[in-house]
Image (tube, rainbow, N blue to C red):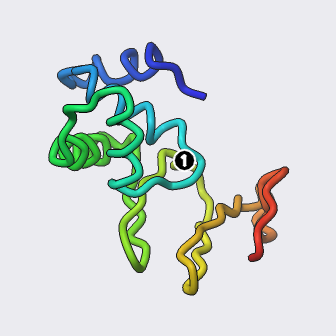
């Protein structure tokens, strides 16, 4: 789990204007294992900042992507965001849209499912 201070330490040297809303958005994405959509992020941040706008979420995600902190995953129904930039594959069920992260084997021999993750893939 990445703390808010770790995010501040990473973003401040990059010249990012750190508002509480931006930090909350970054914290949600960086600490989410479920590849949240813009709407998911918006709903989670609104629990703490009821006046945050969807435009702020979009602009912050674009900024975080440009800085190489997150990446957009253009899934079939909607984009989702991932802060895990290490080599891995995201499997998506075409029926229901759920996703499952698969980690590349360090020896290049295929994929291994993260421990404790049960999925129908």
Q: Residue furthest bottom?
A: 95
Query: Where is mark 1, residue-wise?
Result: 84
Q: Quadrant of residue 4?
A: top left
Between 64 and 87, which is closer to the camera in this rendering? 64
Q: Could you tell me which residue is drawn at 37 percent across and 45 percent down?
A: 43
Q: Could you tell me which residue is drawn at 62 percent across and 60 percent down?
A: 88
Q: Could you tell me which residue is drawn at 41 percent across and 79 percent down?
A: 76
Left or right of residue 81, residue 97 in this image: right
Between 73 and 78, which is closer to the camera in this rendering? 78
Vertical arrangement, residue 93 with respect to residue 104, above or below: below
Check disc 1: other Cα within 10 Å, few if <14, some if 14-19, many if 20+.
some
Point out residue 118 in the picture as x, y percentages from the top left corner.
81, 62
Q: Could you tell me which residue is drawn at 55 percent across and 85 percent down?
A: 94
Label 1: element kind = loop
Vertical arrangement, residue 46 with respect to residue 115, above or below: above
* Quadrant holding the N terminus: top right
Left or right of residue 57, residue 108 in this image: right
Point out residue 85 in the picture as x, y percentages from the top left corner.
51, 49
Left or right of residue 54, residue 40 in this image: right
Point out residue 22 in the picture as x, y percentages from the top left corner.
27, 30
């Amino acid at each position: 789990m990445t703390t808010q201070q770790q995010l501040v330490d990473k973003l401040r040297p990059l010249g990012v204007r750190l508002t509480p809303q931006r930090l909350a958005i970054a914290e949600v994405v960086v600490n989410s294992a479920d590849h949240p959509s813009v709407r998911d992020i918006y709903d989670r941040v609104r629990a703490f900042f009821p006046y945050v706008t969807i435009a702020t979420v979009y602009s912050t995600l674009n900024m975080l992507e440009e800085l190489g902190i997150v990446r957009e995953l253009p899934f079939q129904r909607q984009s989702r965001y991932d802060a895990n930039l290490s080599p891995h594959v995201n499997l998506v069920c075409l029926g229901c849209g759920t996703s499952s992260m698969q980690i590349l084997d360090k020896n290049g021999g295929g994929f291994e499912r993260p421990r404790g993750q049960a999925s129908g893939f």
